Image (cartoon, helix red, strand yellow):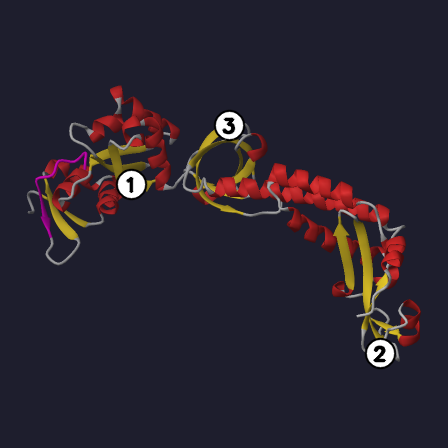
Amino acid sequence: MARTSKAKKQTVSQVEIGTEIFASLRDLEKLKGIPVEYMVERLKQALTNAYRKDQGDNKETPVENVVVDLSEKGLFMSLVKTVVEEVEDSNVQIHIDAAKKLDPKAEVGSTISIPVDIQKFGRIAAQTAKQVVIQGIREAERGAIYESYSSKAQEMLTGTVLRIDPTGDIFVRVGQGNEQSDAVLRTSEQIPGEEFLPGDLIRVYVLEVHKANRGPLVHVSRTHPNLVRRLFELETPEIADGQVEIRNIAREPGSRSKIAVRAAMDGIDPVGACVGPRGGRVGAVVEELSGEKIDIVVWSEDPCEYVRAALSPADVISVTPVEGQKACTVVVPDSQLSLAIGKEGQNARLAARLTGYKIDIKPESQA
């Protein structure tokens, strides 16, 4: 490849913005953790596109034919063209006679770097560099916020209702300061009957986080069973420090939930710990869930004992496993049949989901 002399290249194509740019990039790397090399490549791409857009005669020049050399010494640009005897595309080719004026050693079939006079392009180059740095900062901040909220998936957050969409979706502002982000609470993830107004505080469970142009979009829920789990972890110190464990949760949002708990050490009453003094702990959870009833039962390795407890508050006479199936037959006093089944079968349905067993309930008179 024929080359122009170094002196000629400097006088024609140098723009003294390198020192200032690299000082800014080093500061950016310290503050935001964005590598200088990454931002230099971004700048080169932006300057190439800006040049092609600004120079009308070169709009059709392929990107790979525009060479940008950006260093602390300055900014240099050149066009790479192939030397030919007959020019068919002036964007990528140069006639042999014109090439020899630039480099007497030029030959047909070789390539030559043609210095670009970008003195007038200097102002645009500086503006482009500034825009790229600003955009890089924004992307870094959005990336950091995304990583922050990605780590919060499956956690509970407190936010402020921003607005309510005509579709019923609720947009919530979560986080504080530079880590603020918008979360969307879809209609399908809302507790039936709950109503909120802009400015209301709301607790939500983080389902997933997506990248978006303006930052991470957090999808949250009020109906997920783990919202009940997180609320009890917040209200019950014994759960937070591992003395009590929540083994399973069955929930019909806005109506009723059943949770199975066990003590991780001797001498602990798991149900009493969750209920709290004078029912204060479970009461706080019920209030947060807009009056949703909560049954707390003791988990057991014995399927029969587990099913018996899961049908609480109904009394159970006997539980008989069905051989070869994950099912059982339950006998209850005649007076307890409706309580065991529950309104519209809710108690039996939740007990089955909690235990994983198919439950056939029979009154004592028929058993």
Secondary structure at badge 3 equals loop
Q: Quadrant of residue 181?
A: top right
**Mark 3–mark 1 contact, CB under 8 Å?**
no
Q: In the rendered structure, which amino acid carries the disc numbered 3?
A: Asp
Amino acid found under the numbered disc labelled 1: Ile
Q: Which mark is residue 118?
A: none
Q: Position of residue 230 (x, y in %)?
A: 36, 34
Residue occupying image coordinates x 77% and y 60%: 67
Magenta stretch: give its range.
312-321
Quick check: is 25 in the magenta stretch? Answer: no
Q: Which residue is mark 2?
A: 108
Amino acid marked by disc 2: Val
Q: Nearer the viewer, residue 16 or 193?
A: 16
Q: Which label sits in the foreground, 2 or 3?
A: 2
Query: Residue 94 or 334: which is nearer the viewer?
Result: 94
Look at mark 1 in the image and give the residue it sits on: 249
- Residue 329, image x, y percentages: 12, 49
Q: What's the residue at 35%, 41% (across, down)?
A: 225
Residue 44 falls in which quadrant of the image? Answer: bottom right
From the image, tell me which residue sits under label 3: 200
Q: Quadrant of residue 60?
A: bottom right
- In this view, 55 is above or below 98: above
Disc 2: CA contacts within 10 A as few (<14), some (14-19) or many (>=20): some
Report the mark closest to the observer, 2 or 1: 2
